[in-house]
């Protein structure tokens, strides 16, 4: 099978990929654990490390604490962010986010999200924000929670054609930025190698995110993911 999505994805035992998508690892590497690095985890970490270039001592809000958002949270901790705020609609995910580096958690259906974020990061919002949900309304909230000269990035993918509204006046007078982010703006051989090294040092615990399934249990993996029992499902071929 030839990879078709972002140049590296497939549901097959073997796949042909472009050489730019190949990262060499040691022969004894646990590939089940590192498999998600090629897409979602690279994207979340890259959004923080590359696209936003989060600086030590600054504040970050991550909307959507799935595997991509968790990776962003762990990367923000690696970068030394002062406050890391996780927002999600599932309490279990927020509990894991707190374990992985979030300093504050907020339920996504809380009507006072923006006020609570501004309280954590006074006077008017966070320095950086990432949306990993792909929900247009969440994108609007993310931009609204930015402080002066704050910068936000979207990595979640909504249905093509969906739009979000921006308060132009607030955007103008506060000097906010809202940018896109494709695969974490990463060079795979560099960022994936960095994340593998961080995992080896205990700074990037991928094992907290991955649930493995035999390939014959594909339907269960999809169901568990949709119902929130699995954060990142990985299929194994015997």
Image: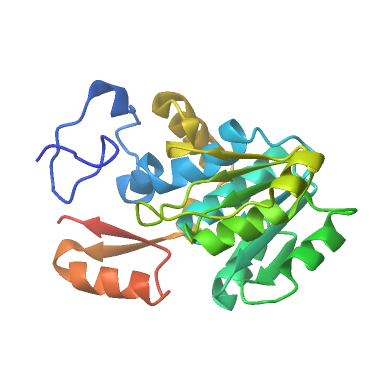
Give the image's coloring scheme: rainbow
Residue at the spot 74% in from the left edge and 34% down from the top edge: 55
Q: Is residue 68 visible?
A: yes
**Residue 77, position as x, y percentages in the image:** 68, 46
**Which of the image's four quarters has the C terminus?**
bottom left
Residue at the spot 82% in from the left edge and 59% down from the top edge: 118
**Residue 20, position as x, y percentages in the image:** 30, 22
Left or right of 143, for residue 68: left
Residue at the spot 32% in from the left edge and 38% down from the top edge: 28
Does residue 2 lie above or below 111 as drawn? above
Q: In which quarter of the image is residue 63?
A: bottom right
**Which of the image's four quarters has the N terminus?**
top left
Does residue 229 lie above or below 62 as drawn? below
**Residue 69, position as x, y percentages in the image:** 54, 55
**Residue 194, position as x, y percentages in the image:** 51, 31
Q: Can residue 22 be seen in this view?
A: no
Pick out the residue farthest to the front.
Answer: 169
């Amino acid at each position: 099978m030839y990879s078709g999505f972002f140049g590296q994805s497939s549901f097959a035992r073997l796949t042909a990929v472009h050489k730019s998508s190949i990262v060499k690892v040691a022969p004894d590497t646990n590939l089940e654990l590192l498999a998600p690095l090629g897409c979602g985890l690279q994207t979340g970490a890259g959004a923080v490390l590359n696209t936003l270039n989060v600086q030590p001592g600054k504040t970050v809000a991550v909307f959507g604490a799935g595997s991509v958002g968790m990776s962003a949270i762990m990367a923000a901790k690696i970068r030394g962010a002062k406050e890391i705020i996780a927002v999600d609609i599932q309490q279990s995910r927020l509990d894991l986010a707190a374990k992985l580096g979030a300093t504050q958690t907020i339920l996504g259906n809380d009507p006072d999200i923006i006020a609570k974020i501004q309280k954590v990061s006074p006077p008017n919002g966070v320095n950086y924000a990432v949306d990993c949900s792909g929900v247009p309304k969440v994108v609007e909230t993310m931009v609204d929670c930015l402080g002066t000269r704050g910068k936000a990035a979207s990595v979640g993918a909504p249905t093509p054609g969906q739009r979000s509204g921006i308060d132009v006046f607030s955007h103008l007078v506060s000097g906010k930025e809202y940018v896109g982010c494709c695969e974490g703006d990463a060079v795979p051989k560099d960022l994936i190698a960095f994340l593998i090294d961080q995992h080896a040092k205990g700074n990037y615990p991928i094992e907290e995110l991955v649930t493995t399934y035999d390939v014959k249990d594909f339907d269960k993996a999809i169901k568990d993911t949709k119902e929130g029992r699995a954060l990142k499902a990985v299929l194994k071929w015997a």
